């Protein structure tokens, strides 16, 4: 993004000073794989911000975490895979509350006086089942002990939040001014994730207040996670949190903070896209020349969600007619004869007609760029998506998830 | 729908008096299968109405047919499969015009003085290629001869418009008052068809004017084809035409005409759904208790287009959480705790919580009903859709279409 920092895909949330993390197998998942993660902020600051799913059906942990974040302050985040705790009624909300209380109690017993309202909760997995609270509460004790053991468990935490993910996703940005921003993620989307949920926790040792964190996070999420659209579906549990410890004692400028948060979100987004369910193609849909940027985003999203476009790309078929048919459904007025469609930089349709060689463009590689120039304004936007493959259908039909 | 008529799935457009039809192989399709159809109105009346795709990218034949229908009068409809003639520029529009001229000339030569502006043109197939006009124009002469041969070629016409359809689709409604309404269809949707295009031609010998036809057709299409949503994509070529010959000399009441057109459209719609690409499940999504009917339609469409819902149904998985996640994205305010979701009549989620046995509902049969009661108003709507199967992915990725 900008000079002055380096990105490495290791350590994640424990790369910045002042953070500890752990991940364990608490027995929530029937498979016995890791399913409970803790991220702990040792301070001296505890500023925090979050963005959440726009779905009106919000899981209990989302309702809880939105509420506690109104204080702009977090000591810890507890995350479980193996169950979304969504659509579980007042009992499910009680389970989330009890989890936060248990984390607060365990941290207090360890010597860090913590209240439940300083603990965010994230859950991911199948919608509609209550969590096995006996296992979860025993797990809380265990995960606090693992965290207290002193190892920088960023990768363990990143593994414990995986569901259909095949690899843990983490990144750390080291700034030349000796502050660091780290993050971990799971899932495959934000406004429109694939199966279940996108969960992201970002940490920094920069000395910044909650308002600055909030501004940087909203801006970055709008340009990254909000523009990753795997299948147009939207989870009940999506959560992105950003915590600062202030341990570096350095306060970056707003521009520096914004750029760092954007760079880390962008990298995590690319990791999510590359590991999306059933993906065989990483596709970027760019619309230019729209009336404004928001129109361009709407248009790019329509193309990115079109099943006929996505199946054609799975087949490496430069079927540009399907792109035009999708674009024709945008909710603002276009002039079809002014449109130029390109695949991987090769124009295939322009001035109302196909270009020579339009059916011969090579789309056999894993990365595909689709560009639609509308030529009616200056608005532009890019949406990342994937193809629609047999593996996607298989993963989403063969078992409840 | 109402008493007083019977529906039979034969004859189609040639069931009413005053109509002839034919279908031939003109060599437009590389496979050599039938690809050119003609529907001819012998009169004495020539009233006609049409509805067309809402896509802003409109194929040349749609542009032509909308124009000629402003007169409310049609002598003939020529339809080709094997090429959509969409996104083909001024040359493609010229091809459509030349086709109408050729039909008019051939009909005039046969003894029925006809102008090109009395001929509607419909095309279906791959977007972006020019039609082989030498073959098409020879075909026009041949199809007029076949029609003139005197056989009631409704089924031949229905076969000649097929693309990925596996069976021809036709129906005839015989009214007790001795008038008849017939129709043929191809494709798999209207506002949101699957591959390529939905084309429908309806004919009647009732004595009714173009305004009555238009009213009946718009009303019926809005309740049937507009609510068939296979994959959310929308064609550049969708066309539904209704022609009357007046040959029965009987003028039904508006209610009778409306009911008959609705019944025929509804039946053709069911045939399109049953033969949709890759279908293994015929799914009806009903939303009730919405603020109004249009809100209910929007909500039903969102569920019907959700890839995670559709893959779950392919797997016969009563994954009601995905239905709730989809409903949570509606653009009006809902109250999640008031929602009841049912599969095949069995409530699976109510009052914010799962119902006992919710994961055990049997969805193994080919017909699945999903009902979402929002409990905030009296609006309701049903959208027909299909599952998202391996066969859908295969048909839409393995070759250009």
Image (spheres, coloured by chain):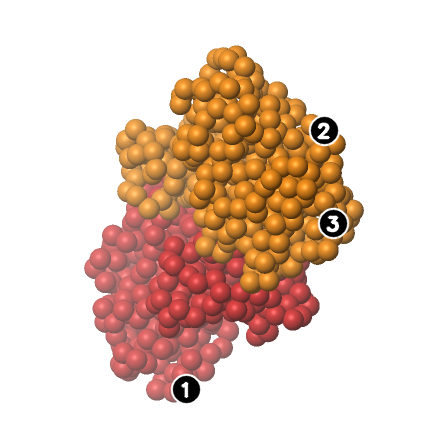
Chain colours: A orange, B red
Query: Is the residue A37 above or below the residue B382 in the image?
Result: above
Please tell me in which quadrant of the rendered image residue B354 appears.
bottom right
**Host chain of mark 1:** B
Label 3 crowd (10 A; few <14 / some 14-19 / many >=20): few
Q: Are marks 2 and 1 on the same chain?
A: no
The Cα atoms of the two marked residues, 3 and 1, are separated by 67 Å
Q: Label 2 belongs to which residue?
A: A150
The residue sitting at the right extreme is A32
Please tell me in which quadrant of the rendered image residue A11 appears.
top right
Position in image of residue A253 (x %, y %)? 41, 19
Check the picture and name the quadrant holding the N terminus of chain B.
bottom left
> How many numbered callouts?
3
The Cα atoms of the two marked residues, 2 and 1, are separated by 79 Å
Residue A138 visible, this orientation? yes
Q: Earlier in the sequence, mark 3 or mark 2?
A: 3
Position in image of residue B383 (x %, y %)? 46, 64
The Cα atoms of the two marked residues, 3 and 2, are separated by 20 Å
**Depth order, front residue of B290/B12:** B290
Q: Are marks 2 and 1 in contact (CB under 8 Å)?
A: no
**Depth order, front residue of B330/B141:** B330
Q: Label 3 belongs to which residue?
A: A138
Identity of the residue drawn at 52% across and 25% down? A246
Identity of the residue drawn at 43% across and 70% down? B375
**Depth order, front residue of B79/A270:** A270
Secondary element at tag 1: loop
Q: Which mark is residue B3?
A: 1
Position in image of residue B263 (x %, y %)? 41, 75
């Amino acid at each position: 993004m900008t000079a002055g920092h380096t990105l490495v895909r290791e350590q994640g949330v424990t790369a910045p000073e002042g953070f500890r993390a752990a991940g364990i197998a608490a027995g929530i998942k029937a498979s016995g794989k890791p399913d409970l993660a803790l991220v702990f902020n040792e301070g001296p600051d505890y500023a925090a911000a979050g963005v959440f799913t726009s779905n009106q059906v919000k899981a209990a942990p989302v309702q809880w975490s939105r509420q506690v974040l109104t204080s702009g302050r977090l000591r810890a985040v507890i995350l479980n895979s193996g169950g979304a705790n969504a659509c579980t009624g007042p009992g499910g909300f009680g389970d989330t509350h009890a989890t936060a209380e248990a984390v607060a109690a365990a941290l207090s017993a360890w010597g860090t006086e913590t209240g439940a309202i300083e603990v965010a909760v994230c859950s991911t997995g199948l919608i509609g089942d209550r969590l096995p609270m006996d296992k979860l509460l025993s797990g809380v004790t265990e995960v606090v002990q693992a965290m207290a053991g002193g190892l920088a468990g960023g990768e363990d935490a990143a593994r414990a939040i995986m569901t259909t993910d095949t690899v843990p996703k983490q990144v750390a940005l080291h700034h030349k001014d000796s502050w660091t921003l780290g993050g971990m993620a799971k899932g495959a989307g934000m406004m429109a994730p694939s199966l279940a949920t996108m969960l992201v926790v970002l940490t920094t040792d920069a000395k910044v207040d909650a308002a600055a964190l909030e501004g940087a996070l909203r801006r970055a999420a709008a340009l990254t996670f909000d523009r990753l659209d795997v299948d147009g579906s939207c989870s009940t549990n999506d959560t992105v949190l950003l915590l600062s410890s202030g341990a570096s004692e350095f306060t970056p400028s707003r521009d520096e903070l914004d750029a760092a948060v954007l760079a880390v979100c962008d990298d995590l987004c690319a990791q999510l896209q590359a590991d999306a369910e059933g993906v065989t193609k990483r596709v970027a849909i760019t619309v230019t020349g729209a009336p404004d940027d928001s129109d361009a985003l709407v248009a790019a999203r329509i193309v990115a969600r079109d099943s006929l476009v996505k199946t054609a790309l799975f087949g490496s078929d430069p079927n540009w007619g399907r792109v035009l048919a999708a674009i024709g459904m945008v909710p603002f007025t276009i002039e079809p004869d002014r449109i130029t469609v390109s695949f991987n930089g090769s124009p295939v349709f322009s001035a109302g007609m196909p270009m020579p060689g339009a059916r011969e463009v090579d789309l056999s590689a894993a990365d595909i760029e689709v560009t639609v120039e509308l030529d009616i304004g200056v608005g532009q936007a890019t949406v990342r998506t994937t193809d629609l493959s047999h593996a996607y259908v298989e993963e989403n039909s063969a078992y409840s998830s």
